[in-house]
Structures are given as C-alpha cells and as structure tokens.
Image (spheres, rainbow, N blue to C red):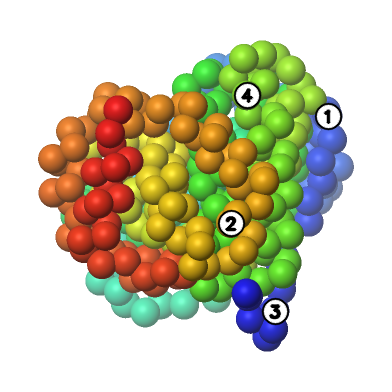
C-alpha cells in the first residue's frame, strides 16, 4: 500500500485536440522571438514552415539539428549559438529527444555563458538553475511523456554517461497534444515509444514514491494502451487509437513526474549508451520478469486484470528477439555493474541485488 502522506504538483497546462497544432499561435504572446526546436525531418515535412506561417518569419528562429539522445556537447554549442538572440520562448515539436533538448535550453539560455552544461553536469558544480524560458511542448510520438515532466535527459557519449537535468523550471509551460502529428510515425518508432509509455506506467506502480494520484494516472494509461497499442501497430492511420496512445503517454508522464522511474530504467541506460539500444526497448524488455519478481510482494494493483493483460501483450511482442538485433546476452550481463543507478534503482519497491538482476536479464533475453 502507498503511504498515506503524499503531495501532488504538476505545473503544465495540457491542451488536447485534433488540429490543436494549427492553433499554436493562440498560445503564444503577440510579440517576442521564438526558438523552434525540432528535427531536420520535421522541417523537410513542412512543420517548421507551418510555425513560420503562423507567427511570421521575423519571429521564428529554427533549430532543427536535434538527433536521438541529445548530446551534452551539442547542447552547449546550441546555447553558445543562441545566447546572443533575444529569445523569449521555445516551441518544441518532436519526440522525447526534442522536448528534452528544448527543456535544457530553456534554462541554459537565460544563463548566458556563465554556466556551460558540461561544467554543471560533468563537474557536478552544484549550480541551481535560477530562471527559464517558457516552453510549449508539442509531442509527435506517444512514449516519453516529456511534455509533462520536470526532468530532461542529456547523454554524454565521451564519458559514456547519462545525466538528468531536473527541477520545477524544467516543466514545460504548455503541452499541446494533437494526435494528427503522430500519424506519420513509422512502425518501429511507434512500437518503441509505446513501450516507453507502458514502462513508465509500470515503473510508477512498483515504486516506493507512488501515491494515489500517480496510481490513478498509471492505471488509466495502461487501460488506454491495452486497447490502442495493437491497433496503432496494425492500423497506423487510425486516428482514434493514435489519440488514445497519446493520452496514455501523457498520463504515464504525469505518473512518473511524481514518482520518477525505477529499476527497468536503471537497467536500460548503459544499454543505450554502449550499444545504441533504443530507449523504449531498453527499458521494457525486462518488464515481465521484474513484474514476476514483485507482483506478490508489492502493490496489490500489480495483480489486476489490466496489468495481467499488459503482460500478455508484452509476451506476444517477443522483445528478446528485438534486443538480439542490438546486443548479445553476454554483453548485456557484462554491464550489470553499471545498471544500479541509485536515483532510479532505489525507487524499486523490492530492491535488487546483482544475482537477482542477472537472473532477470537472462530470463528476459530467452527467445
């Protein structure tokens, strides 16, 4: 049972509607310069131009160089590049990497050149961000829930480390959900991002920080995903199913905004940094075995019908085969020493030692 003593706070306004993206200008001030953070792919597909058409060319600076898993050095370079510009707000259009990059830039740009990211994160300077630029997050994937969370992930390829930038200033001001923007998502990205949302829901349920509010968000996210996930894989143009997956992702994001993630995410980070395993896959291939370990000793909610159906759905995906495309079992086991990130593993309701983790990995990787 979760604790009787708990708090809830989330600072993000959420607007959800088909065609909401076409109303972006309604949520922005009448003046000021906007930094549009996105990818080159979305610029090629015309989304950047649509923003320019809504706001006027003079008001929009386009930064479309975001790649998967935003790199620390790239974000430092972007900060240096855009500090001289009189930017008053940021619009992020893309998946989790785009939104994370935008959220980081929202606190580094107001600092000017005084606190480069590499000093704050690599050298653990202890700097506390003091102000931010407002961010409007427009997700184009249904997975990370980054549009409603107070943290952003930064990757350091040079030191093979993953960092988190966290705090209330990292919350976007507005999450603008338009399921039409997810219709063009390829099958593999649809799969991996949906797995991320499912992982967030489950990780917030087997979590020491869970509350009645986070449980409500996570359980509703799973209920939506159970119905919508198979449909978006089989009929990717089904707008109703896409909308439900988008809502599931957002609700799961609201859940982890309160609890953070747990052991499955702790396991995932070295797999992504060393072998390039997509995040949604890396944090979900162990979910079934983790659930088996904790289902009878943790929250009773883990034995409800919708959780059982989630596990059946995951079993049908055979994620071990997906993992084998990226990494061998012996290489996964060889990373065990890096899989105990205390800020994530410590949230897991059961605890985990090396022997138990090795067993979970081996069982999870069986074809």
Total numbered badges shown on the rendered structure: 4
Specify the quadrant of the image occupied by residue 301: bottom right
The nearer-to-camera label among 2 and 4 is 2
The nearer-to-camera label among 1 and 3 is 3
Q: Which residue is mark 4?
A: 230
Q: Are marks 1 and 4 in contact (CB under 8 Å)?
A: no
User: Does dot 2 land on a helix, a strand or a loop?
Assistant: helix
Q: Residues within 10 Å of mark 1 (few under 14, many from 20)?
A: some
Can residue 160 be seen here? The reply is: yes
The mark nearer the N terminus, 3 or 2, is 3
User: Does dot 1 land on a helix, a strand or a loop?
Assistant: loop
Q: CA distance from mark 2 to mark 4?
A: 21 Å
Q: Which residue is mark 1?
A: 18
Can residue 73 be seen here? The reply is: no
How far across and how far down the image is residue 132, in percent? 60, 65
The nearer-to-camera label among 2 and 1 is 2
The nearer-to-camera label among 3 and 4 is 4
How far across and how far down the image is residue 22, in percent? 81, 29
The nearer-to-camera label among 3 and 2 is 2
The nearer-to-camera label among 1 and 4 is 4
Considering the image in quadrants, where does the N terminus appear? bottom right
Residue 302: assigned label: 2
How far across and how far down the image is residue 319, in percent? 39, 31
Q: Residues within 10 Å of mark 4 (few under 14, many from 20)?
A: some
Q: Which residue is mark 3?
A: 7
The mark nearer the N terminus, 2 or 4, is 4
Considering the image in quadrants, where does the C terminus appear? top left
């Amino acid at each position: 049972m979760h604790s009787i003593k708990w708090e809830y706070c989330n600072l993000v306004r959420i607007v959800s509607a088909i065609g909401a993206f076409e109303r972006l200008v309604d949520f922005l001030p009448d003046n000021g310069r906007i930094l549009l953070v996105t990818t080159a792919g979305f610029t090629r597909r015309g989304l950047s131009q649509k923003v320019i058409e809504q706001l006027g060319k003079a008001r929009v600076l386009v930064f479309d160089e975001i790649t998967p898993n935003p790199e620390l050095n790239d974000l430092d370079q972007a900060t240096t590049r855009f500090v001289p510009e009189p930017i008053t707000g940021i619009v992020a259009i893309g998946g989790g990497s785009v939104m994370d990059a935008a959220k980081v830039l929202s606190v580094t740009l107001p600092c000017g050149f005084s606190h480069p990211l590499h000093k704050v994160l690599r050298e653990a300077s202890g700097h506390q961000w003091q102000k931010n630029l407002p961010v409007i997050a427009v997700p184009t994937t249904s997975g990370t829930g980054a549009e409603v969370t107070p943290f952003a992930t930064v990757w350091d390829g040079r030191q093979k480390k993953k960092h988190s930038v966290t705090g209330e200033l990292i919350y976007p001001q507005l999450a603008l959900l338009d399921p039409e923007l997810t219709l063009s998502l390829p099958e593999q990205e649809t799969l991996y991002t949906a797995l991320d949302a499912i992982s967030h829901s489950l990780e917030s349920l087997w979590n020491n920080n869970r509350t009645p509010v986070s449980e409500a968000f996570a359980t509703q996210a799973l209920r939506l995903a159970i119905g919508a996930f198979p449909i978006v894989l089989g009929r990717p143009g089904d707008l109703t199913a896409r909308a439900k997956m988008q809502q599931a992702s957002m609700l799961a994001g609201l859940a982890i905004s309160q609890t953070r993630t747990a052991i499955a995410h702790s396991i995932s980070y070295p797999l992504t940094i060393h072998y390039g395993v997509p995040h949604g896959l890396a944090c979900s291939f162990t979910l079934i075995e983790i659930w088996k370990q904790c289902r009878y000793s943790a929250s009773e909610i883990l034995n409800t019908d919708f959780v059982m159906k989630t596990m059946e759905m995951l079993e049908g995906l055979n994620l071990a085969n997906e993992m084998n495309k990226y990494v061998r079992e012996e290489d996964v086991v060889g990373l065990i020493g890096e899989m105990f990130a205390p800020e994530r593993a410590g949230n897991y309701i059961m605890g985990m030692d090396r022997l138990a983790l090795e067993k979970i990995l081996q069982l999870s990787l069986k074809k």
